[in-house]
Image (cartoon, grey):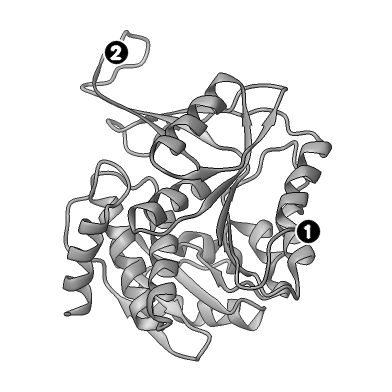
Amino acid sequence: MIYTVTFNPSLDYIVSVDNFKTGATNRTVSELLLPGGKGINVSIVLQNLGIRSTALGFIGGFVGAEIERRLEEQGIRTDFIPVENGNSRINVKLRSIEGTEINGAGPVIGRDKVEMLMGRLDKLEQGDILFLAGSIPGSVPDDIYRSILGRLDGRGVSVIVDATKDLLMNVLEYHPFLIKPNHHELGEIFGVELRTREEAVPYGKRMQELGARNVLISMAGEGAVLAAEDGSVWKEPAPEGRLVNGVGAGDSMAAGFMAGWLEKGQYGHAFYMGLAAGSASAFSEYLCTREEVESLYAKISGE
C-alpha cells in the first residue's frame, strides 16, 4: 500500500487578475479552488496514473472538511486526523504576479495528535511505500521526519522524502529509498549554485554518500537528474512546452517516478515517467493526467 503524509494541507485559491494594483480593488478573471499540499499532490497524481494511495495528515475546521470531501470525490482514500484548534490553511496564489502567494498558518497540532499519526504509521508493513513531503507547521516537532524514519527502520518500508534543509538531511542516516530535492534546495545544502544538469550530478552522489539510496533532482526548465542506487546516472532536459502552472510539478515528478518504478522496476523508465509527470503538470492548469504523461513520456524516451 502507498501512503502520503501532508502535515499542513490546504485549499489553494488560485486566481488571475489583470493589471493587479496594490491599494485598490482588484477583480479576478479566473479562479480555481483546489486541495493542496505536497503529499496530497502526490496522491492526486498517483490516482490519475491509476495507482491507489491513502492520504494521511491533519485537517481542521470547515476548510479541512472541504479538503477531505474534494479528495474523496476524486476517489482518493483519506485517513486524516481532525484537530480542534484552528482551520486548515487557505493559500492564495496570484498567477498574475509570478511567485506571489499568501499561505495560511494552519491549525495547531497537539502532541496527542502527533502520536495518533505515529500509531497509524506503526501499522505499515514490508513492501509499503510512504511519501513524506513538504514543510511542517511550527506546532509539530522539528525532528518529526527523522522520528518517523527511525520508527520504520528495518521494517521494509520504502520511504520517499521531499523536504528541505534539516528536514531532509536528518533522515539520510535511515537510507530513504528516494529523495527529491530541486537544484536550488540541493545547492543551498552545499552552499553552491547549480545551473546545469552536469553541475548537479556530483552533489546528487554526495547525498547518496550521506545515505540516500536514489536522488532525483528537479531542475525546472533545465530538466532533471537521477543518481540511482545501481550507480547509473540519468540526465534529460525538460521537454518543450509552455509553463502554465509550476505548483505541484516537483510533487508530480516524485509520484511519476514511483509509478514508473512500480510498473517495471527499471530506473530509466522511472526517471522518464518522473520527468514526464513533472513537465505535464507544469504545462497544465492543474496536476497531470495519465494521457498527458503518456504523451510526454513518448517524446522524452523516444518510445
The one nearer the camera, 291 or 219, is 291
Mark toward the start of the polypeptide (2 vs 1) = 2
Question: Where is 167 relative to 270, above or below?
Answer: above
Is disc 1 surrounded by few (<14), some (14 to 19) or many (20+) residues within 10 Å? some
User: In terms of image quadrants, where is residue 32?
Assistant: top left
User: In terms of image quadrants, where is residue 145?
Assistant: bottom right
Point out the frontmost of discs 2 and 1. Answer: 1
Question: Where is 262 relative to 102, above or below?
Answer: below
- For the residues labelled 2 and 1, say whether their Cβ atoms are less than 8 Å apart: no
The one nearer the camera, 125 or 132, is 125
Query: Type of residue at label 2?
Result: Asn
Residue at disc 1, secondary structure: helix
User: In terms of image quadrants, where is residue 285?
Assistant: top left
**Residue in the image at 79% along x and 63% along y:** 151
Identify residue for label 1: 147
Question: Where is 33 relative to 248, above or below?
Answer: above
Q: Position of residue 261 (x, y in %)?
A: 43, 75
User: Would residue 11 be found to the left or right of residue 173 on screen?
Assistant: left
**Residue in the image at 72% along x and 22% along y:** 85
Identify residue for label 2: 26
Instruction: Tell me the number on the disc at residue 58.
Output: none
Q: CA distance from mark 2 to mark 1?
A: 45 Å
Q: Position of residue 274 (x, y in %)?
A: 36, 67
**Residue in the image at 78% along x and 66% along y:** 150
Q: Position of residue 6 (x, y in %)?
A: 58, 45
Residue at disc 2, secondary structure: loop
Placement of the N terminus among the 4 image quadrants: bottom right
Is disc 2 surrounded by few (<14), some (14 to 19) or many (20+) residues within 10 Å? few
Placement of the C terminus among the 4 image quadrants: bottom left
Any part of residue 259 in sight? yes
Query: Type of residue at label 1?
Result: Ser
Any part of residue 102 in sight? no
